[in-house]
Amino acid sequence: MLLGPSLAVSAILFSLGVAGVLFRRNAIVIFMCIELMLNAVNLTCSWARRGR
Amino acid sequence: MNVTQAPYVFWFFAAVAILSAATCITRRSPVASALWLVNTLFALAAIFVLLDAHFLAAVQVLVYAGAIMVLFLFVIMLLNLRGQTTDMLGWAGRLVMLAVGLLLTVELWVLTRVAPSEELLPSRAMLELTEERGAVGVIAEPLLRDFMIPFEVVSVLLLAAIVGAVVLAKRRL
């Protein structure tokens, strides 16, 4: 199963979101980077739900 | 379709998501950033389908790629940032960004090493749950029973945010 890779993809997306927040000054783009981080967390949560 | 049958499909969409996200944070124009973010969200929706979270994938496309991104585009076009040359930081900022991003990636990667084992996460569990209660019921039952209070608190928080946005936008009420 691709549990590890899936979490790794999520980790990379989250890091890209953090990097974007640090990198950009435009408030709108910072919000978009926050959306990116939220989606990365969504990806981990969709895995966590399988355990129920 | 299960992940075991489609690892290559998973890798394809993972690559699309990561490359689109990287392009999104490096584009100069906010509109281009928003469109690349839409690409990332679609790829993530495809990954959700591969992980048997079909309802989540549908909501991802409808709410994120549809509603939220259209809202972002409206705001970008209303603010009209055309005159701005660039909002990116200089070389020092880029180095800090790279360092923090790589550090975080490595840290999260190490954390995935201690992830719960396959015995704790049986691969068929989600499919059986979905067949038992339906795709919406799997989401709705914990949301509206186990996490009822946090759910309502978030809705009050959103209402406060709406009121705050109106107060900020209209100086003279």
Image (cartoon, coloured by chain):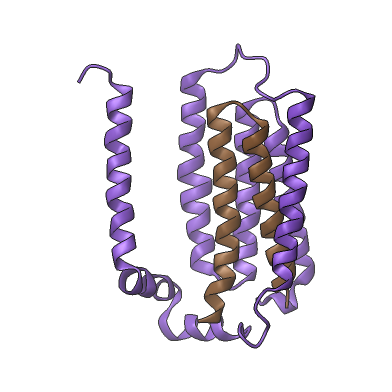
Chain colours: A brown, B purple
Residue A36, relative to residue B44: is it above or below?
above
Please report the residue visible at 46 percent of the width from the left and 50 percent of the height from the top: B63
Q: Position of residue B21 (x, y in %)?
A: 69, 44
Q: What number of labels is visible?
A: 0
Q: Quadrant of residue B33?
A: top right
Q: Quadrant of residue A35?
A: top right
Please report the residue visible at 73 percent of the width from the left and 37 percent of the height from the top: B97
Please report the residue visible at 71 percent of the width from the left and 30 percent of the height from the top: B27
Q: Position of residue B140 (x, y in %)?
A: 37, 70
Residue A51, relative to residue B66: is it above or below?
below
User: Is A23 left or right of B128, judged from the image as shown?
Assistant: right
Task: Name the image quarter holding the N terminus of chain B.
Answer: bottom right
Please report the residue visible at 44 percent of the width from the left and 86 percent of the height from the top: B132
The front one of A6 and B111 is B111
Q: Position of residue A27 (x, y in %)?
A: 53, 29
The front one of B19 and B168 is B168
Task: Name the image quarter holding the C terminus of chain B.
Answer: top left
User: Is A15 left or right of A42, judged from the image as shown?
Assistant: right
Q: Position of residue A36 (x, y in %)?
A: 59, 47
Residue A8, relative to residue B82: is it above or below?
below
Looking at this rendering, what residue extends furthest in the top direction?
Answer: B83
